[in-house]
Image (cartoon, coloured by chain):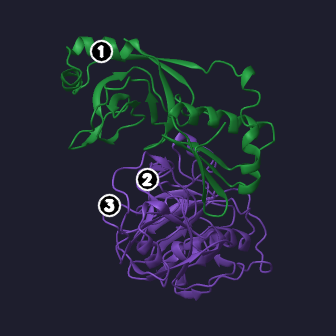
Chain colours: A green, B purple
Amino acid sequence: MEPLRTLKVGLDSLLLEFGSGGEVVEAFRSARSRRDEGLLEAIEIIPAARTLLLSGVEVDRVLGDLEHWGAGAGEQQQPELIELPIRYDGPDIESVARLWDCTAQEAASFHSSLEYSVDFCGFAPGFAYCSGLPEGYEVPRLTRPRSAVPARSVGLAAGYTGVYPRASPGGWQLIGSVDIPVWQEGSGDPALLRPGCRVRFVP
Amino acid sequence: MNTMTVLDPGFLTTVQDLGRPGLAHLGVSGSGAVDPDAHRLANRLVGNPESAATLETTLLGVTVTFAHSVVVAVTGARCELWVGERQAAMLRPVHVPSGSALRLGPSAQARSYLAVSGGIDAPVVMGSRSTDLLSGLGGRPLGCGDRLRIGLDPGEPRFADTAIAQRNPGPGIRVLLGPRDDWFADATLELLDGAKYLVSAASNRIGLRLQGPELVRRRPGELAPEPMVLGAIQVPPDGQPVIFLNDHPTTGGYPVIGVVHPDDLFNCAQAKPGDPIEFRVVLGP
């Protein structure tokens, strides 16, 4: 596990910078398992697009420990696969199809043919940034964000697919909606999509 | 069961405890009392565990009444305290008879804390009773007529062992540079040390918005979203810094020039619109 750069954040946090979202997720898993084994003390382990943040840590100790992070990767199990039933009936499916130079139906079957991976959560509790669209399929955000996006809407922005956990404002282009909740506050595990999960959209 | 009824919520009053640490990877902010030392002290004064929920007021205080008599304590920003027609003291247990109005007046700083013996028994959401104003987790800001349950297990009010560790209130805020100080020109980093700002009226539990010298970037372009910490000083394209407080987003796309020293966060918690803030760059603890 070789971060490109390590950056101190305040007195007790460390930011690790990686070359790809996949490496961030791998480092996230290593950090969580080292914490579970009692080898790392951290309050938060937060992945984002190209960086992983560890907060509430002894910075020098973590820097010295990084070289051991790859160890045990062999026994790593395949990450959980989550299947989301989807209807491709979003208001922006036509505009996405134009961007991809195909019909709405083709855009839908292309989107559902791919497997995605949750790189990180942000924007709102349980909002997962799912990577997996190939290069060249990036979708710009709406120039005027919607003031209200219904819960369970599926949107695209840059190379990511996201599912709105709850009704909220939002600027992603909406291609459809899923039939199951991705965020349940009452339950012990409120977020269905967690960093590292694999995701498939099933029409 | 005892209840508290809000007669006047002031400008903004919310239920807060020590928040929801450890869930930022799901997009859940830490939230919790913005001045945790004051929150903890209020709880100690009424014999609660420090994790019990209190009311956090903002600038204009709050007025409440109780169905049955209770012991309360008020800490944090200095304000007048009234029980019915009688004035009471902050920083000590105060008896409030049933039916009497308890009024916290406007405060000299931003946030006061009202602890009630037994704690405020608002619903627990993901391990905390805190209201998160960014994500909407927990309850809503309190309104007139809202009724909250008081916990059943009142502790023994205490007078001793209650002081907050020495704090030095004032405009000086120590800053540890990074992680993205390399996005800013050398002249900007020099300017940051000693730079004076005013707290903007747009400040809230999400962030302290500052007005003053523009922090100019060396690099154009966008930063890929990256994790954010409490006290991060984020610089949007207009160059006016925002200090992230407890309800801050867990990730953000603007570069963080530096992070506030943890021992100076209470100054940010208690700064009100119009107050001066002066940054001082330090290299370590």
Q: Output the chain of dot 3.
A: B
Say if labels 3 and 2 share a chain: yes
Residue B83 in view (yes/no): no
Is residue A107 positioned above or below B52 on the image?
A: above
Q: Mark 3 = which residue?
A: B237
Q: Quadrant of residue A175?
A: top left
Q: Quadrant of residue B230?
A: bottom right
| Residue B169: % across, % down | 58, 84
Q: Is residue B161 left or right of residue B271?
A: right
Quarter of the image where the C terminus of chain A is located: top left
Residue located 29% across and 31% down the image? A139
Structural distance between the alpha carbons of marks 3 and 2: 21 Å
Point out the tag, 3 or 2, that comes first from the N-terminus.
2
Q: Secondary structure at mark 2?
A: loop
Which numbered tag is attached to residue B134?
A: 2
The amino acid sitting under disc 3 is Pro
Q: Mark 1 = which residue?
A: A108
